[in-house]
């Protein structure tokens, strides 16, 4: 709901799924793109229930038989047995109502009033009753407080319930965490230790607060077959002229070694087992000879000016997602570090290097000093 633009939430759902997220709360994206839908109820749902009277008489079909069973008496029996009669009645009523409507996907937001002394206990009571009727609860969501501490405490209670009541489903419950999750919080939680099995990430994903503007621009490198260059006092802003083909070179260990930019008209692209000189585009002394064990061409043309769209099918969203997953799995672990990640190198061929510097020289005015 905080995404920018008329289709911001939809677009964020699409591309986050491609990037590796497992599900979305955006129902439209689920319908149109086939992305799995997931989510829980809101705090306002819990707040709207004021007493247990609101769910008296609510019945649920027994999955182990055909009879309809009133859920509330079963839940209250477990609350009495546990000695948890001081939990919030309105919250318990909300959980009973939610379980009646969604018995097969019962995942509750437990922090509306008191996470450990009310929400968690009410969830446990309803879960035990659902298990009696043949349904498997899904878990809880934490949306505030110390997520590391609370998740570990909840996990401890679940394991205790599993052992004391011989209910193994408690071992498999999800503990979902939300509340302005970002990369820093994820890294901190991993250092502290936690029992969270799933993260719900919204605001910091769709608004990209750490980098709200995409740091890339369109640059002209060729006009009617003639290479063009842009010069700058900032070396990273100097363009590499001409049409190029990008290749990824893999080493013996299976990791990609570097990406290589080769002029489109060059007669000898890199090949498996062939020695190729890879150069830093701007620093003459930086170069390396690579004998790739595998060579992958990175780009395919999807629009070609006057020729339009090539006659080939574009990959589906699931195929694209799998491709992204494969790329991540083939990335060296040090490059995925949160702090001081390794640098991935992009080089140019010998011919491209020489052409770049030749054009650079020809386009640079010669100063005259007297």
Image (tube, rainbow, N blue to C red):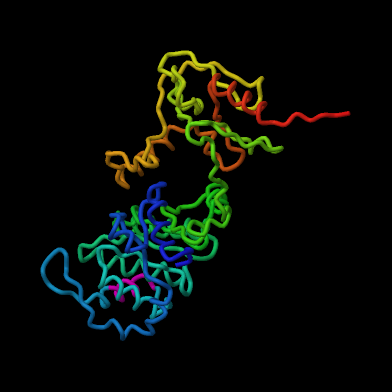
Give the magenta-colored segment's residue range.
Answer: 75-83
Magenta stretch: includes residue 79: yes
Magenta-drawn stretch, dominant element (helix, strand or loop): helix
Residue beneath the point at 69% across and 31% down: 364
Residue 42: percent from left, percent from top: 40, 72
Quarter of the image with the C terminus is top right
Which residue appears farthest toward the right when viewing the image?
A: 370
Residue shown at 42%/47% (left/top)? Answer: 19
| Residue shown at the point (66%, 31%) measured from the top left | 363
Q: Is residue 177 magenta?
A: no
Q: Quadrant of residue 176?
A: bottom left
Q: Quadrant of residue 310?
A: top left
Residue 162 percent across, percent down from the top left: 33, 56
For the image, the number of numbered tags is 0
> Is the residue 338 above or below the residue 296 in the image?
below
Q: Position of residue 308 (x, y in %)?
A: 34, 43
Left or right of residue 135: residue 49: right
Q: Is residue 245 above or below residue 213?
A: above
């Amino acid at each position: 709901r905080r995404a920018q633009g008329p289709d911001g939430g939809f677009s964020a759902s699409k591309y986050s799924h491609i990037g590796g997220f497992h599900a979305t709360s955006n129902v439209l994206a689920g319908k149109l793109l086939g992305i799995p839908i997931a989510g829980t109820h809101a705090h306002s749902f819990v707040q709207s229930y004021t007493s247990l009277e609101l769910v008296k008489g609510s019945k649920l079909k027994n999955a182990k038989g055909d009879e309809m069973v009133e859920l509330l008496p079963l839940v209250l029996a477990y609350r009495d047995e546990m000695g948890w009669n001081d939990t919030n009645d309105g919250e318990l009523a909300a959980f009973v109502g939610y379980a009646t409507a969604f018995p097969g996907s019962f995942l509750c937001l437990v922090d509306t009033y008191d996470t450990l002394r009310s929400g968690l206990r009410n969830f446990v009571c309803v879960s035990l009753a659902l298990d009696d009727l043949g349904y498997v609860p899904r878990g809880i969501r934490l949306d505030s407080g110390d997520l590391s501490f609370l998740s570990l405490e909840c996990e401890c209670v679940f394991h205790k319930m599993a052992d004391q009541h011989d209910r193994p489903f408690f071992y498999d419950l999800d503990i979902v965490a939300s509340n302005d999750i970002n990369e820093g919080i994820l890294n901190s939680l991993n250092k502290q230790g936690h029992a969270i099995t799933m993260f719900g990430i919204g605001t910091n994903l769709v608004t990209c607060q750490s980098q709200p503007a995409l740091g890339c621009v369109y640059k002209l490198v060729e006009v009617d077959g003639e290479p063009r260059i842009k010069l700058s006092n900032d070396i990273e802003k100097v363009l590499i002229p001409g049409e190029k083909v990008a290749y990824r070179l893999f080493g013996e260990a299976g990791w990609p070694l570097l990406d290589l930019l080769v002029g489109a008209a060059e007669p000898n692209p890199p090949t498996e087992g062939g020695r190729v000189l890879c150069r830093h585009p701007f620093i003459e002394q930086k170069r390396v000879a690579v004998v790739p064990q595998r060579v992958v061409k990175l780009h395919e043309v999807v629009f070609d000016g006057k020729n339009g769209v090539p006659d080939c099918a574009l990959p589906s969203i699931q195929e694209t997602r799998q491709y992204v997953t494969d790329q991540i799995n083939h990335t060296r672990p040090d490059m995925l570090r949160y702090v001081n990640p390794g640098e991935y190198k992009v080089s140019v061929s010998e011919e491209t290097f020489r052409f770049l510097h030749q054009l650079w020289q020809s386009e640079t005015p010669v100063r005259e000093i007297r």
